[in-house]
Amino acid sequence: MKRKSAAVDPVARARDALRARGMRWTPQRRALLEVLVEASGHVTGAELIERARQRDPETTPSTVYRTLDVLEDLGLVSHSHGHDGREEFHVWPASEHAHLACEACRATWEIEATEALAMTEALARTRGFAVNLSHLTVSGLCADCRRSADAV
Amino acid sequence: MKRKSAAVDPVARARDALRARGMRWTPQRRALLEVLVEASGHVTGAELIERARQRDPETTPSTVYRTLDVLEDLGLVSHSHGHDGREEFHVWPASEHAHLACEACRATWEIEATEALAMTEALARTRGFAVNLSHLTVSGLCADCRRSADAV
DNA sequence: CTCCGTTTTGAGACATGTTGCAACAAGCGG
DNA sequence: CCGCTTGTTGCAACATGTCTCAAAACGGAG
């Protein structure tokens, strides 16, 4: 008998977190959660809508975006903006981190909190500003693209 | 006789810069440039379209955005993305700088290159990554909003 | 001044989100 | 099991950009 433990199954944990806040567990939210457990790394809003539609073609964008907002409040996803401003969702971040994005080749990397510490601490000290690291995307040119640009 | 010196008038300088690259000087570009010389600080794309329409109601969005792209190539404007991903244009930046944006009160500040140096240098050293500081917006909570949040 | 090649423009479709509002339904209490 | 209350959904309109393509026009050559 394969029964999932509520403490381990992320979908069940999300459900409990919602209920604990007086929010509701709906088929739409369940569907998106199922999409999310199968996603990894970064996904755009459009991709999530696309995948949710494969399960249920009735899926509407506004519900997806609203659900993502709720899940972000719960800390289950976080979002930042790519170099072009499009939203990118990061699912179940193991640790808080920022992103690095190359404007030329579009590759991205993660910047762990420790690596950004010098800046976030400086801002906290001099301005009392609390940086939202998860939302941060640093763009520029990666080492490879920089070399290519020099060659021109 | 009030004649403008080409070396001083920013609109004339933009015109020359365009021509030097084999690009053309059109009424639409001139109109946007005139809007820009009267703008200061940060403006969103929508605001620029709005203002350009006050001069010429025929102004179309695609032309405005394309012109802004061209002017960014020339270094006359730069753009970054606000906390919600919307474009924000910075006109004739005196110096390269990043932005700080409070997610709660929407206030913004500028971060001079020296202040961000610790991070940009670290990324250059460890990853060979060249940060595009002008495009960078760091979001989070400012000192005031952080206090308010604590109070809740 | 006219012609021509090339760059720009404008129109409209499309992409990605956001928002207001009326209808719906989750989950609680009887 | 039935109704209520209140959180959610879906629709449709809007907001902000981007892209394609034919038509217009800049600006240099003749």
Image (cartoon, coloured by chain):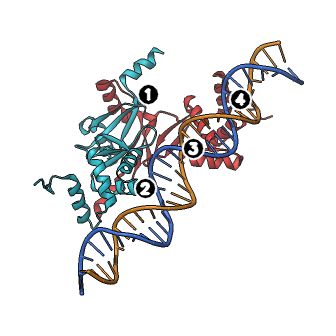
Chain colours: A cyan, B red, C blue, D orange
Residue A104 is labelled as: 1
Q: Separation of disc 1 and disc 2 at Cα?
A: 33 Å
How far, Cα to Cα, is label 2 from label 4? 57 Å
Sequence-first tag of 1 and 2: 2
Q: CA distance from mark 3 to mark 4?
A: 22 Å
Subunit of mark 3? B
- Front tag of 1 and 2: 2
Tell me the kind of residue under disc 2: Thr
Q: What residue is pinned by disc 2?
A: A60
Amino acid at circle 1: Ala
Q: Which residue is mark 3?
A: B40
Distance of label 4 from label 1 (alpha carbons): 38 Å
Q: Which mark is residue B5?
A: 4
User: CA–CA distance between discs 3 and 2?
Assistant: 40 Å
Look at discs 3 and 2 and give the one toward the viewer: 2
Q: Residues within 10 Å of mark 4 (few under 14, many from 20)?
A: few
State the SS at label 2: loop
Residue A137 at x, y percent in the picture:
37, 39
Marks 3, 4: nearer the viewer? 3
Q: Are marks 2 and 4 on the same chain?
A: no
Identified at 43% across, 18% down, the residue is A148
Where, by quadrant of the figure, is residue B5 drawn? top right
